[in-house]
Image: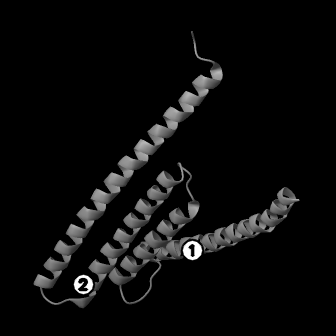
Amino acid sequence: MPARPGEFLARTVRAIEVTENAIHAVVAILLTALGVALIIDTVRQIAVILAGPYNLPAIVLAVLDEALLLFIIAELLHTVAIALRHGGALDPEPFLVIGLVAGIRRVLVLTAESEQSFHWNPQGIELLILMALILVMAITILVWRHSARLRGDATSATAPSSARKSQG
């Protein structure tokens, strides 16, 4: 006897959800492995820099570059954990934060490697574009948080009145 269309659809949706969770779990495992490998590589790079001639800007640049990259991996892992916890629902804010950190990381690396004076060469244009991108992402995060706060206030403002109706 063939299954009813509603049962088939429910099974299909459930299979998709299980597959999605499995993919999220694999991504989490890969990000964790990447983070561990990055930590090992960071320690190795710092040891190589410290073994050579003392060069504080090189040390600071290497540590900052690797630390921000680790932060990006950690944010991605956190986002995957949220997706697993909430059944695949993704919040755009962590991705905006990741983009913001990546942009800031690139600006720091470019400015540390650049010459003392500013020129409108490809690096200067890239810096200008990155600064505009960072500004747009920061404003977007502020707007997102403000709208989430307004949605939260609207939800809490309506909750007591509906609770009173159910009591009355």
**SS assignment at label 2:** helix
Q: Amino acid at mark 2?
A: Ile
**SS assignment at label 1:** helix
- Per the model, the C-alpha gap separating discs 1 and 2 is 28 Å
Farthest residue, direction right: 168
Q: Quadrant of residue 74?
A: bottom left
Residue 163 location, x and y as percent?
80, 61
The C terminus, quarter of image? bottom right
Of label 1 and label 2, which has the lower sequence position?
Answer: 2
Give me the residue at 64% from left, 20% from top.
5
Q: Amino acid at mark 1?
A: Ala
Nearest the eye: 119 or 71: 71
Residue that mark 2 sits on: 59
Residue that mark 1 sits on: 132
Give me the residue at 64% from left, 74% from top.
142
Which disc, if any, is residue 10? none
The N terminus, quarter of image? top right
Q: Quadrant of residue 146?
A: bottom right
Give me the residue at 60% from left, 71% from top.
141
Image: 10 above or below 17: above
Residue 155 location, x and y as percent?
75, 64
Residue 41 location, x and y as percent?
21, 68
Nearest the eye: 40 or 14: 14
In this picture, residue 95 sits left or right of residue 76:
right
In this picture, residue 57 sits left or right of residue 128:
left
